[in-house]
């Protein structure tokens, strides 16, 4: 809204008197109409009216169309509005567009440059929109599809002179790829005596192809049967279709190039695209429904993925989950990462995309790396760092229960290594690891501290009695005569078992167990009448 005279007629004349201003009359439907002569405006202040129906939108840049529509609607409500615009013919020209509603003559639109010299000396002629190509036209044809006449709108639509059309069979003006369809549609129309419609590419005056829709209507004329063809420009719509088709083709090419399985389905679960990798992962057989894919996912992971799909189709967020996939045909069990992606926005999901990535090897490699990082390579028991970490975690668990440790040291192990060799010694350590893991309770930890020293962490027990019970089983498991690499080897071990004391850390607890173990080893040495410690043991 701008300041100025309150009377609409006076305001209109004031606007028109601005340097370079030009006026147009607007009908009730928004289309331009002739300026009433009663206003007494000179021709050089009136924007030329084109032959076809036109609006003020034809004059301004397409990007400003919504702004102009808003200003027009505001003027209909309040009697006046103003907005800054730029001309299609002179995009660099900045103008002000005023809409004014007068009681007697209706609405007017006044365009005026922000600077008097912006349009030069052309005045309203510079404001006039370039001649717009009609969107529709009429062509008359004989029963054999030879064109007999065309109206002016059709000539301007196609950009062809009348002599280029009349006497020519219409198929000769169509794109070669569309001719067979057009001929088939024409023959069907003649045989069924029913009107028909088809879309083809039609040649234009500059040699380019224009997508048009031909609506053929059978009529009886003075010379017999003829066809009236209503021609409509559908190039914008077809360009949109072609763009979508190109996007779809690009999507397919990218999807086939990805190392991921891609499955796209609509809201009712009908699959409309799968790439080769997805079919390879799922295995032989149809993939027509989303259930064909989801049915290969096993366990709780498969159930969770089905929940994710339901959530996505209901307008929820995308999600992902690692799951086991049972491959059809081979029965192979693969570990896959499944990502669910919504097609659409918010609660208007029109479908879902599943991305399947085979992470079996990666998962196995990660598990192997974790095993190597946490386990002793020889015995398979936890390594020193991991068993100590597990012990520290056990001491942090709140509650009235406690944690115990059993420090295990093999007797006469140095003798085995020195007399039978390190290969037999290693075999003995492997056997010890297996026996220890079999002797402890589920949830207890077995680790190798180094050499022939092992540590058992007895977790979540009421007191020393339960620790002693585990110790007895460990001691029994490590008392045996073994056959290793053709040699008879006596397996014996000394075990020191203690329970955690308040305020004691993991290192102090293990040190007490170590002391207890050596006390037992010394006592057994005295009872046996021989020193069984490695430091003083001599080969026999």
Image: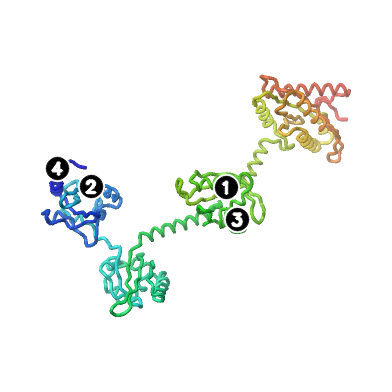
Horizontal relation, residue 250 to residue 128: left or right:
right
Q: Which mark is residue 5?
A: 4
Q: Earlier in the sequence, mark 4 or mark 1?
A: 4
Residue 159 image offset from top left, x and y in percent: 28, 67
Residue holding disc 2:
75
Residue at x 14% of width, y 42% of height: 5
Q: CA distance from mark 2 to mark 4?
A: 16 Å
- Bin the neighbour count of mark 3 within 10 Å (Cα to Cα): few under 14, some 14-19, many 20 and up: few
Q: Earlier in the sequence, mark 3 or mark 2?
A: 2
Residue at x 34% of width, y 71% of height: 217
From this view, report whether residue 485 is shown above or below residue 119.
above
Q: Secondary structure at mark 4?
A: loop
**Extreme-bottom residue of the structure:** 223
- Is there a contact, CB below 8 Å, between mark 3 and mark 4? no
Q: CA distance from mark 3 to mark 2?
A: 63 Å
Residue 363 image offset from top left, x and y in percent: 63, 44
Q: Earlier in the sequence, mark 2 or mark 4?
A: 4
């Amino acid at each position: 809204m701008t300041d100025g005279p309150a009377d609409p007629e006076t305001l209109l004349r004031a606007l028109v008197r601005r340097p370079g201003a030009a006026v147009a009359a607007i009908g009730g439907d928004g289309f331009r109409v002739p300026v009433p002569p009663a206003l007494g405006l000179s021709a050089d202040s009136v924007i030329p009216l084109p032959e076809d129906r036109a609006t003020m939108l034809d004059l301004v840049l397409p990007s400003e169309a919504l702004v102009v529509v808003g200003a027009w609607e505001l003027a209909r409500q309040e009697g006046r509005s103003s907005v800054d615009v730029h001309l299609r013919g002179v995009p660099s020209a900045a103008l002000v567009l005023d809409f004014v509603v007068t009681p007697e003559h209706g609405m007017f639109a006044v365009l005026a440059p922000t600077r008097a010299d912006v349009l030069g000396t052309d005045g309203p002629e510079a404001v006039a929109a370039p001649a717009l190509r009609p969107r529709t036209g009429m062509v008359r044809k004989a029963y054999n599809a030879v064109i007999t006449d065309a109206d002016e709108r059709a000539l301007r639509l196609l950009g062809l002179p009348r002599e280029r059309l009349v006497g020519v069979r219409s198929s000769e003006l169509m794109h070669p790829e569309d001719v067979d369809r057009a001929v088939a549609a024409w023959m069907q129309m003649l045989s069924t005596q029913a009107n028909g419609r088809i879309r083809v590419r039609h040649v234009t005056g500059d040699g380019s192809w224009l997508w048009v829709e031909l609506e053929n209507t059978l009529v009886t004329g003075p010379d017999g049967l003829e066809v009236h063809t209503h021609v409509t420009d559908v190039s914008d719509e077809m360009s949109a279709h072609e763009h979508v088709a190109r996007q779809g083709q690009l999507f397919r090419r990218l999807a086939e190039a990805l190392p991921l399985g891609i499955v796209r389905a609509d809201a009712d679960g009908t699959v409309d695209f799968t790439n080769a990798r997805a079919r390879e992962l799922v295995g032989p057989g149809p993939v027509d429904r989303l259930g064909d894919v989801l049915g290969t996912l096993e366990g709780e992971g498969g159930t969770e993925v089905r929940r994710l799909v339901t959530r996505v189709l209901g307008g929820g967020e995308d999600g992902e989950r690692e799951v086991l996939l049972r491959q059809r045909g081979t029965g192979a069990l693969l570990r896959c990462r499944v990502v669910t992606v919504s097609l659409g926005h918010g609660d208007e999901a029109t479908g879902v995309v599943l991305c399947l990535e085979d992470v079996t090897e990666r998962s196995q490699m990660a598990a192997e790396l974790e095993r190597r990082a946490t386990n002793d390579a020889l015995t398979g028991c936890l390594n020193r760092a991991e068993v100590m970490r597990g012990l520290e975690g056990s001491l942090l668990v709140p509650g009235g229960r406690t944690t115990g440790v059993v420090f295990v040291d093999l007797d006469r192990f140095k003798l085995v290594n020195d007399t039978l060799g390190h290969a037999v010694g290693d075999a003995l350590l492997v056997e010890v690891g297996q026996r220890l893991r079999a002797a402890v309770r589920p949830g207890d930890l077995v680790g190798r501290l180094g050499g022939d020293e092992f540590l058992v962490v007895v977790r979540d027990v009421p007191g020393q009695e339960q620790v002693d019970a585990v110790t007895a089983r460990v001691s029994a498991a490590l008392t045996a005569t073994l056959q290793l690499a053709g040699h008879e080897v006596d397996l014996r071990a000394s075990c020191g078992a203690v329970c955690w004391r308040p305020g004691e850390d993991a290192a102090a607890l293990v040190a007490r167990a170590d002391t207890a173990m050596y006390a037992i080893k010394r006592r057994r040495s005295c009872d046996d009448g021989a020193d069984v410690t490695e430091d003083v043991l001599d080969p026999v």
